[in-house]
Amino acid sequence: MHILHQPISPTLANALTFSRDIGMFSLSRPISSCTHKTPACARCHQSKLYDLCGHVMVPKDINNEAAWIENDVDNLVSALRRKKADTSRIRLMCRGEAFSTLEDVTRVERLVSALTVNSKRLVWVSTRAWRDKSILKELLRLRREYRGLRILASIDDYSLDSPNDLENLHVWLQAGGGTMYFGDDTRRSFVVAGREYRMFECPKTHKGIKGACMTCRLGCFARNRRGGVEGVHVHLKRH
Ligand code: SF4
């Protein structure tokens, strides 16, 4: 007997994946969306995964990207309501870049708006789009306007050595933006415009605590005493 497999329709609800590593649901895009990558991204573990199991990842990528462009956020909100697992934190993107182009700003904004309205849910985005001046401006605006949004500027040794990147990073840091560093496991701080920023050791990668992101309070989701979003600088260890 032949079993006919129904093709999975490319919706955000179907693209949603639970990751045990971070302990939450996330969306992903193909790594071709990483338009703001630096030379350090050549060592990205996702690129290595493509070498090993690209045949499984590529069909998913095609669906994920179609769903992202379609951007059916209402369907996604309904799907989250039906989940048994905790959906109070959602990650964009587990793989790929949420702000690949300026057009993505509208997509992220619709999604964050729908996911956080009348809810304490937090949407967590780690991005390299701050390297693009026009998108950086939008990131600063989104950060101000959406309390439920946690944006971290993803940084590495290349960015900390590049005059163009340092100029943008300085703007982000002055506005209180947080960062997520990956590269040298022995680094404890970084300097931008003469100021030293100490980094917080990520418990998931430094202590190997699986799923720590769902309950982590002092890292990417930290708030300061007045309830504002602290510019936390997270250090990720090779894992
Ligand atoms: S600092 Fe916390 S939330 Fe951020 S990656 Fe590490 S465990 Fe996850």
Image (cartoon, rainbow, N blue to C red):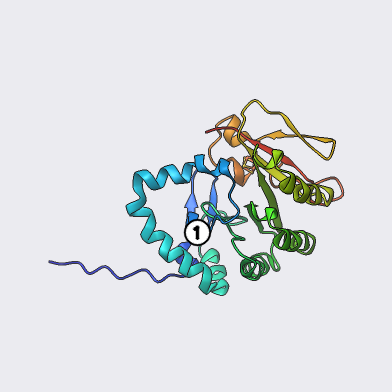
Seen from the viewer's position, the closer of residues 16 and 78 is: 16
Q: Amino acid at mark 1?
A: Arg
Taking 150 as reference, is 193 left or right? right
Determine if residue 179 is in view: yes
- Residue in view at x 70 percent, y 61 percent: 135
Find out if the beta carbon at label 1 lies less than 8 Å from the nearest ligand 1 atom.
Answer: no
Q: Position of residue 169 (x, y in %)?
A: 75, 48
Q: Quadrant of the N terminus?
A: bottom left
- Relative vertical location of residue 98 with respect to residue 167 in this rendering, above or below: below
Determine if residue 218 is in view: no
Seen from the viewer's position, the closer of residues 208 and 125 is: 125
Q: Position of residue 57 (x, y in %)?
A: 38, 54
Image quadrant in which you'd find residue 120:
bottom right
Image quadrant in which you'd find residue 76:
bottom right
- Residue in view at x 81 percent, y 51 percent: 171
Seen from the viewer's position, the closer of residues 3 and 167 is: 167
Q: Position of residue 68 (x, y in %)?
A: 52, 67
- Residue in view at x 57 percent, y 74 percent: 74
Outermost residue on the left side: it is 1
- Residue in view at x 62 percent, y 61 percent: 99
Q: Position of residue 82 (x, y in %)?
A: 51, 65
List the residue tagged with mark 1. 29
- Relative vertical location of residue 18 with respect to residue 52 in this rendering, above or below: below
